[in-house]
Amino acid sequence: MPWLSAQAADAGPEFSGLPVSLDAASSEIDAKTNALVFRNVVISQGDMRVQAEHARATGLNFANSRWNFEGNVRIEAEQRGSLRSDQAVVEFKDNHIARATITGKPAEFEQRRAGSDQIARGHADEIFYDVNDGTVRLTDEAWLSDGQAEISGPLLVYNIREQKIQAVAAPNAAPGSDQSVHINIAPHAAGTGKPEPARPEPAKPEPAKPEAAKPDAARPQPTQPAAAADVTPKS
């Protein structure tokens, strides 16, 4: 299972010197509470991007703040990863995105792996993305798949950079229960990792059919000489 094997870890996102930009269709500011509400908002920094229908925060501050996003939340993560959900809480620290917790029915994760056509997909009721560690932590109805194998359990931790997964069962979970780890592997052709397409059978030559016997042509019968008439006079 390629997605269970560790690979050389890539470096995490580099935010040094990159500005944080915010675009929104509209905004409201409560001067008394310093609360901000944005509609159709997009916050981006380098390759990282958060967008949603609504966002709420206390103060326009990315040094140390928590933002609440609602409605079609989508987070573009590192290493071609993305997260989708109904709601998300994004924490900013030192002027960059530090972590995000997304919730939904379900919350979803996806990563297109470099140098491969395989896509790792997962969903859970809650997904926690730690940007510093480069991991996504799936809890409550957690499930992950790369198209060949599926794994489910109460807790799954996927490393985006190493493309490695750790599955944890609940303490004292009975085998086969909802709190244990389940792995399903799809059958595939040996040595290829992909199902082998059916090959058409070559057409078989039809055996030669014996020719039907032809009826002989009617042969003319030889002409019989006519009997000679008796012309001897009778006495």
Image: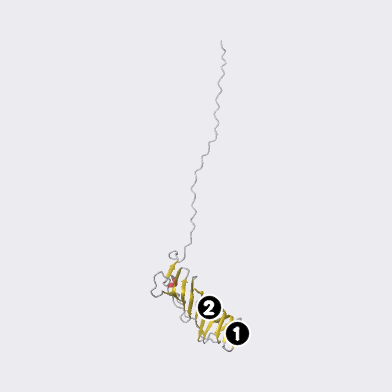
Which SS class for mark 1? strand
Disc 2 marks a residue whose amino acid type is Gln
Which SS class for mark 2? strand
Q: Residues within 10 Å of mark 2 (few under 14, many from 20)?
A: many
Give above or below for 97 relative to 113.
below
Residue 81, visible in the rendered structure:
no
Disc 1 marks a residue whose amino acid type is Glu
Give above or below for 126 relative to 63.
above
**Which mark, by number, is residue 113?**
none
Residue 176 vs residue 67, the one in the foreground: 176
Give above or below for 201 relative to 152.
above
Mark 2 to mark 1 CA distance (whole Å): 20 Å
- Quadrant into which the N terminus falls: bottom left
The picture places residue 235, in percent across and down from the top left corner, at 56, 10
Residue at the farthest right position: 26
Residue at the farthest left position: 172
Residue at the farthest bottom position: 32
Residue located 60% across and 83% down the image: 27
The picture places residue 93, in percent across and down from the top left corner, at 50, 85
Residue 202 vs residue 71, the one in the foreground: 71
* Picture mark count: 2
Residue at the farthest top position: 235
Which residue bears the numbered disc 1?
28
Q: Residues within 10 Å of mark 1 (few under 14, many from 20)?
A: few
Looking at the image, tell me whether mark 2 or mark 1 is earlier in sequence order.
Answer: 1
Which residue bears the numbered disc 2?
87
Quadrant of res 24? bottom right
Residue 45 vs residue 184, the one in the foreground: 184
The picture places residue 120, in percent across and down from the top left corner, at 48, 72
